[in-house]
C-alpha cells in the first residue's frame, strides 16, 4: 500500500517547515454544482495553482505547533464568514490560542480535511 502524499513529502524533507521546500503548501478542493461530491482538486508545494496566483499578495497564516500521531494543524483561525456573516471561533483543543480554532489535515490517509470549531 502506498503512503499518503503528505506523508511522503514530510518524510523526504524531515526538516519540515524550517526548510525552504515548505514555504508554501496549497490545497484547493472543487465541488460540482450539486455540492455533494468532489470534482477534483490541487495539492501544490512551493507553487501556486495558476487560477489562484493572486493569493501570493495576501497576509500569510503561520502553521501552528499542535500535533498528534495522525493530525497535523494547518494554521489557526480567529473567525469565519458564512453568507457574509462573521462568526467568532473557539476550540476545545487545549493548546489552541484563545478565541481561535485550528483546522487539521489528516495525514494518516491524506484524503481528509477535518476541523474542530464552535462558531458562536
Image (spheres, helix red, strand yellow):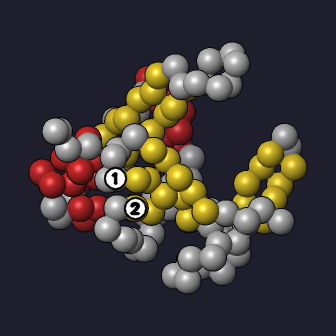
Q: Quadrant of the N terminus?
A: top left
Q: Quadrant of residue 66?
A: bottom left
Above or below, 105 against 34 in this view is below
Q: Quadrant of the C terminus?
A: bottom right
- Residue 61 visible at all: no
Q: Secondary structure at mark 1?
A: loop
Q: How many marks?
A: 2
Which residue bears the numbered disc 1?
Answer: 107
Q: Secondary structure at mark 2?
A: strand
Report x, y in % for residue 59: 56, 53
Q: Which residue is mark 2?
A: 71
Relative to 9, is 43 above or below?
above
* Identity of the residue drawn at 31% across and 68% down: 69
Can residue 3 be spotted in the picture? yes
* Percent coordinates x, y for residue 42 in the rendering: 41, 29
Left or right: 7 in relation to 90: left
Residue 52 pos. (x, y %): 51, 29
Question: Crowding near pointer 2: few (<14 within 10 Å), some, many (20+)?
Answer: some
Front in this rendered view, residue 80 or 38: 38
Closer to us: 117 or 86: 117
Q: Residue at x 17, y 38 (%)?
A: 2
Name the residue: 29% across, 61% down: 17
Left or right: residue 81 versus residue 73 is right
| Outermost residue toward the front in this view | 1
Gap between marks 1 and 2, in whole Å?
6 Å
Instruction: Look at 66% across and 81% down and name the residue there.
Output: 98
Could you tell whether 118 is left or right of 104 in the image? right
- Left or right of 12? Residue 67 is right
Which of 5/97 is in front?
5
Where residue 112 sits, quadrant-wise, is: top left
Amino acid at each position: 500500500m502506498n503512503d499518503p502524499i503528505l506523508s511522503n513529502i514530510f518524510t523526504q524533507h524531515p526538516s519540515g517547515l524550517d526548510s525552504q521546500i515548505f514555504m508554501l503548501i496549497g490545497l484547493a478542493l472543487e465541488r460540482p454544482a450539486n455540492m455533494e461530491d468532489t470534482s477534483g482538486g490541487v495539492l501544490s508545494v512551493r507553487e501556486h495553482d495558476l487560477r489562484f496566483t493572486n493569493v501570493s499578495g495576501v497576509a500569510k497564516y503561520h502553521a501552528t505547533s499542535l500535533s498528534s500521531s495522525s493530525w497535523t494543524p494547518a494554521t489557526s483561525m480567529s473567525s469565519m464568514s458564512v453568507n457574509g456573516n462573521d462568526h467568532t471561533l473557539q476550540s476545545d483543543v487545549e493548546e489552541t490560542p484563545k478565541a481561535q480554532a485550528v483546522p487539521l489535515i489528516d495525514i494518516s490517509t491524506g484524503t481528509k480535511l477535518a476541523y474542530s470549531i464552535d462558531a458562536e
